[in-house]
C-alpha cells in the first residue's frame, strides 16, 4: 500500500478526510483489537512506508478546549497517533513551491478509530482538542527549540476553519505571530 492510500472500508472507519492534504502528509489506518478489557493495536512498525524514523517519542494528555499550535518545523517530521479522545487537526503547507500549493486542510480524529498521521517539516499543524484526549508523537529529530516555529491559530491567512473560535492556549502559543512572519523561515519545497 502506498502511504497516501487509505482503503475506504466501512468495517474500518477512518478520520474525516478532506479531498486533498498538503504534499507529504498522509494518514495510515491502524487496527484496534477490541474486547471487554479494552483495545490493543500497533501504532508504528519500522517496516511501514512512513518516510519517518522517529528518534524521540512523547505522550501528552490534553483537556477539552485546549489548542496546541499552530506549529511548524524547519527540520523535523512528526508521526502522530491519537489514542483516546477527539480532536480537530488543522494543516497548512507553508513550503514555497509545494506540489499542492498552500493546501489548508482540517481533519477530525477519534481515538476509537486509530489513524497515524505523518506531518512533514514545513507543514503547519495545530491540534484543537474537542474532548479530553491522549496522544503519542514521534519525531524524526530530537527536540530543538530553534526548530519549533509557529503562527497564531486564528490567523485568517492560514485558511483553517476551526470548529471553535475560543480555546485554552499556552502563553507561548497565545503570543505566536501571524503566518506571514513565519513564512520567511520555512525552506522551499524540494523533491525528496
Image (spheres, rainbow, N blue to C red):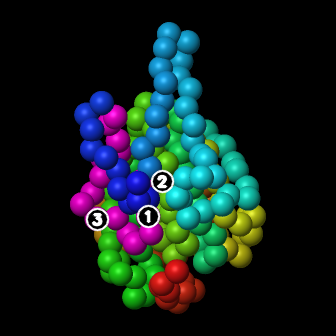
Describe the element under mark 2 as helix, strand or loop: strand
13 falls in the magenta region: yes
- Count of marks overlaid on the render: 3
- The residue lying at 69 percent from left, 48 percent from top is 58
State the CA–CA distance, disc 2 to disc 1. Answer: 7 Å
Q: Are marks 3 and 1 in contact (CB under 8 Å)?
A: no
* Residue 67, percent from left and from top: 50, 52
Q: Are marks 2 and 3 in contact (CB under 8 Å)?
A: no
Task: Name the image quarter holding the N terminus.
Answer: bottom left
Is residue 84 shown in magenta?
Answer: no
Query: Magenta stretch mostly in which secondary structure?
Result: loop
**Which residue lies under the disc numbered 1?**
25
Query: Looking at the image, which residue is at 30% across and 30% down?
Result: 11
Q: Are marks 2 and 1 in contact (CB under 8 Å)?
A: yes
In the rendered image, which residue does mark 3 sit on? 20
Find residue 12 and report its image quarter. Answer: top left
Where 170 falls versus 39 (above or below)? below
Where disc 3 sits, the SS reads loop
- Where is residue 108 shown, x and y percent of the image? 36, 46
Disc 1 on helix, strand or loop? loop
CA distance separating discs 3 and 1:
10 Å
Provide residue 99's location: percent of width, then percent of height. Answer: 35, 81
Q: Residue furthest top?
A: 36
Q: Quote the CA–CA distance across marks 2 and 3.
A: 14 Å
Question: Which region shows up in magenta?
Answer: 12-27
Q: Is residue 69 left or right of residue 75?
A: left
Amino acid at each position: 500500500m502506498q502511504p497516501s492510500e487509505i482503503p475506504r472500508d466501512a468495517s474500518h472507519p477512518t478520520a474525516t478526510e478532506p479531498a486533498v492534504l498538503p504534499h507529504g502528509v498522509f494518514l495510515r489506518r491502524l487496527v484496534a483489537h477490541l474486547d471487554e478489557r479494552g483495545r490493543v493495536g500497533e501504532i508504528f512498525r519500522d517496516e511501514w512506508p512512513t518516510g519517518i524514523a522517529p528518534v524521540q517519542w512523547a505522550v501528552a494528555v490534553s483537556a477539552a478546549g485546549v489548542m496546541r499550535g499552530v506549529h511548524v518545523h524547519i527540520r523535523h517530521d512528526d508521526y502522530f497517533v491519537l489514542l483516546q479522545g477527539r480532536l480537530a487537526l488543522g494543516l497548512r503547507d507553508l513550503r514555497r513551491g509545494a506540489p499542492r500549493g498552500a493546501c489548508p486542510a482540517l481533519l477530525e480524529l477519534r481515538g476509537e478509530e486509530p489513524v497515524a498521521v505523518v506531518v512533514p517539516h514545513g507543514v503547519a499543524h495545530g491540534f484543537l482538542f474537542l474532548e479530553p484526549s491522549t496522544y503519542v508523537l514521534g519525531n524524526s529529530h530530537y527536540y530543538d527549540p530553534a526548530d519549533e516555529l509557529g503562527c497564531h491559530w486564528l490567523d485568517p491567512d492560514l485558511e483553517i476553519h476551526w470548529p471553535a473560535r475560543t480555546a485554552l492556549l499556552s502563553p507561548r502559543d497565545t503570543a505566536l505571530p501571524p503566518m506571514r512572519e513565519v513564512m520567511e523561515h520555512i525552506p522551499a519545497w524540494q523533491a525528496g
